[in-house]
Image: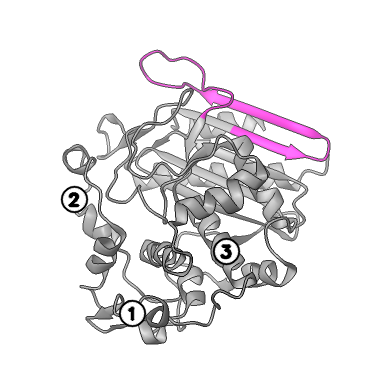
C-alpha cells in the first residue's frame, strides 16, 4: 500500500493518505507533504473534505424514511416538492425519488452555472458566495433536461440538492440534523460533520491544491468553493477512520433494513463515456465497481477544487479503504495518470486476502 501511495505521489499529487481496515487489523500509508510551504508530512488522522460522499449519507437517510413508510422511492418529486421542478421541459410529475438517487432523472447539473470559467480568478472571486438549495434548483430549471427520466444515466448534483429538500419537507428538519441524529450519533462518528457554509477544516489537515491552467501554479484551495460545496450534494467533512466505519456499518446492515439495503444496492449501468471504470454500476448513493480479482466493491468518491477522496468496501464489508489525494492537476493526461494510480491502489487494497 505504501508503494501504491508513492506511485500516486510520483504522478504529481502533493499529498496522499490511505487507511485500510481488514479483519487482521488496520494499515495506513502516507506520501508527499501536508503543504508546499512547511513540507511537513501528511497528518496521520487528518480531516478531509468528503465532497460527494455526502450523497451516500443523504441517500441512507432517505432510505431510512422509506423504511419508516414516510415516503416511497416511487413517489414523484412533484408530490413531495410541489412546483419546484418545472419549466424548460422539466417535469417533477414524471421524476421519482428513485430517479434522483439513481441519477436517472435527466436534470441538468447546476455546478456548471456556478463555475462557468475555470480559473483561479473565478475561484477567488466567488468562493465565499453560497446559494440556498432552492436557488440552485432554480438555476438547473433554466436548462432543458438532458434526457427523459429513467431512459439514461448522468451524474447531476441537482438530484441530491432535491433529495436534501425532500428530507426537510418530510421530516420538518434539515438533512444535516437528520444525518447527525440517524447516522453520526448512533455510530459514534465524532469527527464527521455537516459544516454547511463554514469554510475551515478542523486541525490537523493537509492543504488542498488546485492547478487551474496547464503549466500554471498550484493554487491553495483548502478554503472550499461554497457555491457547490455547502449542500446535500457535497458539503460534509470527516476523517478516514470515521468514513471506513460508516461504510462498513452501512454495508453490514446496521443502518438499513435488508429490504432498504437491497434497494440501495440495486444498480443501473453507468455508460462507458462518463469517466468510470468499465462495468461500474450506480445504486442509490452507492456505486459498484468491478475488482480485478473478481467481484467488486461498493463506495463513492468525493472531489472539489484541490482534492479527491474515495471510500470503498468489499460487498461483505470485511475490507474498507479510504484514499485521499490533496491536489488536482489541470492537464487531462496527468489527471488520467493520477486516476489510474488511485484506482489501482484501491484494487490492490481490496483484492488482497490477508
The local secondary structure at tag 3 comes to loop
Label 1 Cα neighbours within 10 Å, binned few <14 / some 14-19 / many ≥20 = few
Relative image position of residue 231 (x, y in whole percent)? 37, 53
**Residue that label 1 marks:** 82
Inspect the magenta stretch and tell me whether residue 24 lies in it.
yes
* Residue 324 can be seen in this image: yes
The residue located at (30%, 75%) in the rendering is 84
The residue located at (61%, 44%) in the rendering is 185
**Residue that label 3 marks:** 278
N-term-proximal mark, 2 vs 1: 1
Q: 48 or 137, which is in the foreground?
A: 137
Q: Quadrant of residue 144?
A: bottom left
N-term-proximal mark, 3 vs 2: 2
The residue located at (42%, 68%) in the rendering is 169
Relative image position of residue 163 (x, y in whole percent)? 44, 66
Label 2 Cα neighbours within 10 Å, binned few <14 / some 14-19 / many ≥20 = few
The local secondary structure at tag 2 comes to loop
Magenta range is 18-46
The local secondary structure at tag 1 comes to loop
As drawn, 104 above or below 320: below
Q: Of tags 3 and 2, which is closer to the observer?
A: 2
| Disc 1 from disc 3: Cα separation | 38 Å
The residue located at (42%, 70%) in the rendering is 154
Inspect the magenta stretch and tell me whether residue 311 lies in it.
no
Q: Of tags 2 and 1, which is closer to the observer?
A: 1
**Residue that label 2 marks:** 117
Looking at the figure, which quarter contains the C terminus?
A: top right
Classify residue 98 as left or right of residue 195.
right
Looking at the figure, which quarter contains the N terminus?
A: top right
Relative image position of residue 278 (x, y in whole percent)? 57, 64
Amino acid at each position: 500500500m505504501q508503494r501504491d501511495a508513492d506511485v500516486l505521489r510520483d504522478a504529481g499529487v502533493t499529498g496522499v493518505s490511505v487507511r485500510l481496515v481488514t479483519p487482521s487489523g488496520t494499515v495506513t500509508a502516507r506520501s508527499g507533504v501536508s503543504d508546499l510551504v512547511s513540507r511537513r508530512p501528511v497528518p496521520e488522522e487528518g480531516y478531509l473534505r468528503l465532497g460527494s460522499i455526502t450523497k451516500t449519507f443523504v441517500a441512507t437517510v432517505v432510505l431510512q424514511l422509506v423504511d419508516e413508510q414516510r415516503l416511497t422511492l416511487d413517489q414523484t418529486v412533484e408530490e413531495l416538492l410541489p412546483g419546484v421542478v418545472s419549466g424548460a421541459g422539466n417535469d417533477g410529475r414524471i421524476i421519482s425519488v428513485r430517479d434522483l438517487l439513481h441519477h436517472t432523472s435527466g436534470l441538468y447539473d447546476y455546478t456548471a452555472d456556478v463555475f462557468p470559467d475555470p480559473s483561479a480568478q473565478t475561484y477567488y472571486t466567488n468562493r465565499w458566495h453560497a446559494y440556498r438549495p432552492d436557488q440552485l434548483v432554480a438555476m438547473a430549471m433554466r436548462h432543458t433536461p438532458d434526457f427523459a427520466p429513467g431512459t439514461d444515466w448522468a451524474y447531476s448534483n441537482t438530484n441530491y440538492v432535491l433529495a436534501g429538500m425532500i428530507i426537510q419537507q418530510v421530516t420538518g428538519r434539515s438533512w444535516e440534523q437528520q444525518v447527525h441524529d440517524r447516522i453520526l450519533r448512533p455510530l459514534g462518528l465524532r469527527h464527521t460533520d455537516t459544516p454547511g457554509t463554514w469554510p475551515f477544516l478542523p486541525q490537523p489537515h493537509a492543504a488542498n491544491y488546485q492547478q487551474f491552467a496547464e503549466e500554471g501554479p498550484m493554487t491553495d484551495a483548502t478554503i472550499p468553493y461554497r457555491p457547490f460545496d455547502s449542500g446535500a450534494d457535497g458539503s460534509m467533512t470527516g476523517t478516514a477512520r470515521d468514513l471506513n466505519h460508516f461504510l462498513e456499518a452501512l454495508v453490514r446492515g446496521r443502518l438499513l433494513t435488508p429490504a432498504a439495503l437491497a434497494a440501495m444496492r440495486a444498480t443501473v449501468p453507468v455508460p462507458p463515456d462518463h469517466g468510470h471504470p468499465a462495468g461500474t454500476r450506480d445504486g442509490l448513493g452507492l456505486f459498484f465497481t468491478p475488482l480485478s480479482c473478481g467481484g467488486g466493491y461498493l463506495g463513492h468518491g468525493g472531489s472539489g477544487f484541490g482534492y479527491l477522496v474515495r471510500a470503498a468496501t468489499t460487498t461483505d464489508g470485511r475490507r474498507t479503504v479510504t484514499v485521499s489525494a490533496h491536489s488536482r492537476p489541470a492537464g487531462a493526461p496527468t489527471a488520467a495518470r493520477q486516476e489510474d494510480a488511485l484506482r489501482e491502489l484501491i484494487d490492490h487494497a481490496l483484492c488482497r486476502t490477508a
